[in-house]
Amino acid sequence: MNKLLALNNVRIAYDDTEVVKGITYDLQAGEIGCLLGPSGCGKTTLLRAIAGFEPIRAGSIDLKQSTVSRPGKVLAPEQRHIGMVFQDFALFPHLNVADNIGFGISDRPGKERRKRIESLLRLVELPDAGSLFPHQLSGGQQQRIALARALAPEPSLLLMDEPFSSMDVDLRESLAREVREILKREGTTALLVTHDQHEAFAMADRIAVMQTGLIQQWDTAFNLYHTPTNRFVAGFIGQGALLPVVRDNRGRLISELGPLPEVGTEASITGNMEMLLRPDDVVRQSDGVSTEVVGKAFRGADILYRLRLQSGTEILYITHGRDNFTLGETLSVGLDLDHTVLFSVAESV
């Protein structure tokens, strides 16, 4: 695969306030990436810089091995061959679906333009919608038409800024999966901005978790969940608890739920340690540690329980929806670990 987008130590500032603080990452051709983080972390500013709408203070942005942004030079957005999909769809209400899709390719011969529009309508699985107007479509259908319009000129890179945020939670995730399939069929390189980890997981090949203008970890969804590099990523991705860990007089790592496997990283940690405990790391165990059920969230196929240990520490436990325990009930649990993630207690969030 070829590197299509490369950011090299990019810094962006408004007056004296630096909002992007030296970011380096790349996207391969055909890859779908994601900038994921809380509001105000710099992800949309970075996306705008890639599109050419924001100048950068330091570093460079390369597209297809050509520098498009550096201090003092910004290639105009229309010269970058980049497509954009916005949060509000930005469809033209006075144009029908076919004309919305074809708006960016009006310079093509009529037959070629019609063929491209028909191809994209099939791609987004709305082959008969060409004569309809945006107000006649559902929110999900409008988003697919907005995607088709952005893909019509065959952009080198597609940028998507919170494209599903106006939709309800269930529709967001399902539409993110649909959009991923469409982009993969088209072979389009794309970069998504979102604050929603479920959207990111459903759509992206790799995800950059951002905080205060910095990338904390740039990795697959699986690795972000199972092997976060710091406390912020551990807390922002998925659910879990931090459980105190000590070393006994035989050198073993011990938690309130029992001994832990040695993982190698603990050698670099001095002082007190805590382990990241995900809900799926906890299992019922007849000879395990006694806990009290103090919280319960029924989620259909599964139930997420909050359990209190004798020390007062609370952990999470997930099980299928048929295990219906009551608040105050006692459960005996243990650990089912194939790896351990440890943090120093002194590490700041």
Image (cartoon, helix red, strand yellow):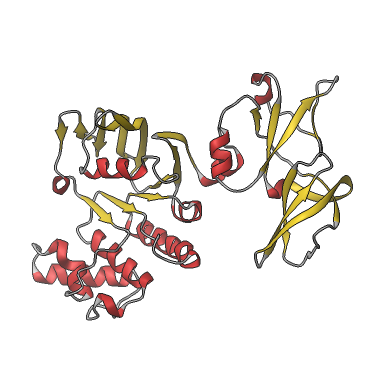
Quadrant for the N terminus, please: top left
- Counting from the top left corner in percent of width and height, residue 69 is at 20, 34
The mark tally for this picture is: 0
Instruction: Choose between 153 and 53: the one closer to the eye.
Output: 53
User: x%, y% of residue 283?
Assistant: 78, 50
Q: Residue at x 81, y 36 (%)?
A: 256
Q: Is 335 left or right of 45, judged from the image as shown?
A: right
Residue 81 coordinates in the image, percent (x, y): 19, 49
Residue 157 percent coordinates (x, y) = 27, 49
Q: Is residue 267 above or below residue 235?
A: above
From what the image shows, is residue 213 above or below residue 82? Answer: above
Q: Residue at x 20, y 42 (%)?
A: 52
- Given residues 332 and 19, the one toward you in this image is 19
Q: Is residue 167 left or right of residue 318?
A: left
Dividing the picture into quadrants, the one containing residue 222 is top right
Image quarter (top left, top right, bottom left or bottom right) of the C terminus: top right
Task: Tell me the residue at 49%/64% (across/down).
Answer: 169
